[in-house]
């Protein structure tokens, strides 16, 4: 899951030096933690309710993708039966109004890739958020990682985790969600998510893994550090005459013991 997703800045800390990165302009050297509108839970809740993943899939993938907002896709081995976010425009409008009443100006920044995919998803997301009453300031760039990872100067961005429920997929989740991870792009810190990650990491059975993914999914739905939009489908294609293939993680296969059956 999370092959196509939206990531939020929940207050990621930046180390300022000489006014750089750009978000540090006018700030003294040292640690600085901006507070963009995406740190507001109601803003993230409104974002989640405003997104119609089926329509996004129709625009970008001609309806041939796997739209959904679950953290773990239904096809996964350890799917924990935790439903994702539900498209609800009326709810999104209400949440926007409530967040504005609490001091939000209704604006949010969005950054994505300047290519056909990035342009398409940007248009779709912007239109859906505008229907909910959000003003979206879009930015299309050659490399989203510069804004998210290098400069850490974003509110929300198009992203992808490739979070399969295998060993590599788990570490993608761990690196992005663990409170102490240096690869935590969003500044997300959650005891509930950390507990779920710990359960999966220490699991010695499928049931224990499933329990861990359930805890992680529940934290994801409640706290919304990101929104999964479309699951990433991977395929291994082979002929029946090819024997001895060793599947590892995702769609990676070892051929060192492969042989042809006559």
Image: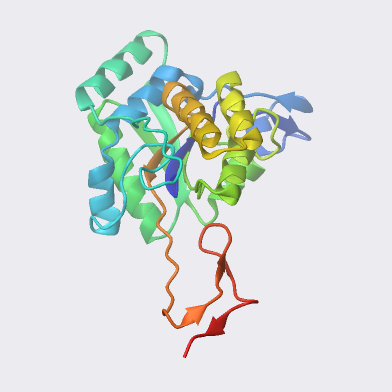
Residue situated furthest front in the rendering: 262
Rendered image coloring scheme: rainbow
Between 55 and 163, the one nearer to me in the picture? 163
Between 220 and 26, the one nearer to me in the picture? 220
Q: Quadrant of residue 69?
A: top left
Residue 225's spot in the image, x, y percent? 50, 29
Q: Quadrant of residue 44?
A: top left
Asked whether residue 79 is in view, the answer is yes
Asked whether residue 187 is in view, the answer is no
Q: Residue at x 43, y 43 (%)?
A: 5
Residue situated furthest left in the rendering: 90
Between 85 and 25, the one nearer to me in the picture? 85
Q: Residue at x 26, y 38 (%)?
A: 52
**Position of residue 203 in the picture relative to residue 44 (left or right):** right
Residue 156's spot in the image, x, y percent? 47, 36
Residue 116's spot in the image, x, y percent? 36, 60
Instruction: For the N terminus, give its image quadrant.
Output: top left
Vertical arrangement, residue 133 with respect to residue 240, above or below: above
Q: Quadrant of residue 41?
A: top left
Q: Residue at x 57, y 40 (%)?
A: 173
Vertical arrangement, residue 172 with respect to residue 19, above or below: below
């Amino acid at each position: 899951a999370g092959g196509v997703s939206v990531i939020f800045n929940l207050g990621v800390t930046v180390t300022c030096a000489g006014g750089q990165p750009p978000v540090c302009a006018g700030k003294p050297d040292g640690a600085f933690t901006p507070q963009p509108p995406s740190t507001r839970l109601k803003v993230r809740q409104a974002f989640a309710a405003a997104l119609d993943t089926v329509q996004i899939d129709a625009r970008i993938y001609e309806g041939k993708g796997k739209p959904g907002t679950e953290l773990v896709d239904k096809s996964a081995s350890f799917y924990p039966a935790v439903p994702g976010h539900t498209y609800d425009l009326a709810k999104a409008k209400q949440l926007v109004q409530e967040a504005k009443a609490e001091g939000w100006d209704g604006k949010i920044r969005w950054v994505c890739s300047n290519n056909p995919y990035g342009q398409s998803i940007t248009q779709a997301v912007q239109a859906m958020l505008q229907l909910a009453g959000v003003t979206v300031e879009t930015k299309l760039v050659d490399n989203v990682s510069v804004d998210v990872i290098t400069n850490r100067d974003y509110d929300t961005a198009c992203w992808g985790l490739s979070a399969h429920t295998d060993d590599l997929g788990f570490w993608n989740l761990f690196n992005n969600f663990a409170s102490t991870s240096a690869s935590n792009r969003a500044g997300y810190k959650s005891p509930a998510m950390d507990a779920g990650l710990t359960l999966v990491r220490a699991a010695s059975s499928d049931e224990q893994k499933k329990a861990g993914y359930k805890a992680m999914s529940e934290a994801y739905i409640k706290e919304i550090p990101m929104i999964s939009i479309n699951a990433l489908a991977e395929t291994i294609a082979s002929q029946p005459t090819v024997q001895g293939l060793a599947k590892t993680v995702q769609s990676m296969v070892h051929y060192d013991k492969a042989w042809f059956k006559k």
